[in-house]
Image: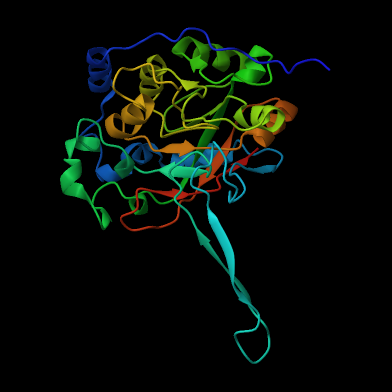
Amino acid sequence: MPEPASTGPAEVPRVSRQEFDALFAAVRTWGLWDPADRGAWNRVTPDHVRRAAALVQDGTAVPLGLPWNTRPGPDNTRPALHYMSDLGDVEAPEPAAHKDFLGVDYHGKGVTHLDALSHIAYRGQLYGGRPAREFIGAGGARFGSVSALGPLVTKGVLLDLPAVLGTDWLDPGHAVHARDVLAAERALGVGIDDGCAVLLRSGRFRRRRELGPWDVDAASAGFHVDAVPLLAERAISLLGADGDSDVRPSPVEGVHSPVHALAIAAMGVPLLDNLDLEALSAACAEAGRYEFMIVVSPLDVPAGTGSPVNPVALL
């Protein structure tokens, strides 16, 4: 049986801390919006929503969230919880009611979730330059809470890199550069423009299905920091991936999640982590188009730094 096609990681260009700090300053949007804790979601207007709705042609709805992940593994070190709290024998009279409990430490690699602006600080500062120690405490976030975001409906663009390269997946450690983003736009016939959501498919979950789980904190495909200025120039509102958007190991000395720092703390762009993009890849290939309407509705968690989510793409 032939081995699955993949792309091995090339040597990833290293970036010094000084170079990274200059990049952070170059893409920073501090002071651009009010309310500031909605960040780049302020870009999305009713016109953006109407244009996104016009992309819905055949009515196909594709969920992008992973199943609730209670199984431990190298890529799920903090499994979600699910247990029954009532088996129908507590309440009387009829009818019987069956109830369950859900709990999750979702900022990891096993649960599809949204990172709000309070999730990341760089050099001690949240988005807009607010001191993290003053705005984040035991009670949660006093700035950049997920409750400030609300729902997002906008145009989504799938950068399906394995489809572009004719492979099944990108191997862990494969860095996606600005030139790769431009090549994907041309190959897939998409345009990244203001207010849109950009989703990167590396084929992580196809690789996992065929080869088994691995430690994605140690090695995963994702964006190199040199792709971020292009995304900033295009004025995106949301960035997501079937990983966590960062290539790992990090190419930046002393910064373990540089794309997180640039997107959230510099640009005010929330992130979607651990999306299941396999069904969307198949649906886009069948439809012959990689643009769609995306709906993201996080839980309203006051002072929360993010939320589990199950976004939906509509084609």
Most foreground residue, 113 or 27: 113
Residue 189 at least partly seen: no
Image quadrant where one finds the N terminus: top right
Residue at the spot 50% in from the left edge and 42% down from the top edge: 77
Residue 281 percent location from the top left of the image: 66, 30
Asked if 4 appears above or below 61 in the picture, the reply is: above
**As drawn, is 65 to the left or to the right of 303?**
right
Q: Is residue 125 left or right of residue 46?
A: left
Residue sitting at 20 percent across and 42 percent down? 132
- Residue 220's x, y, as percent? 51, 24
Q: Residue at x 47, y 32 (%)?
A: 244
Percent across and percent down for residue 58 are 72, 39
Is residue 259 shown above or below 54?
above
Q: Is residue 28 visible?
A: yes
| Residue 89 in the figure: left or right of residue 145 | right
Q: Quadrant of residue 21?
A: top left
Residue 164: image quadrant is: top right
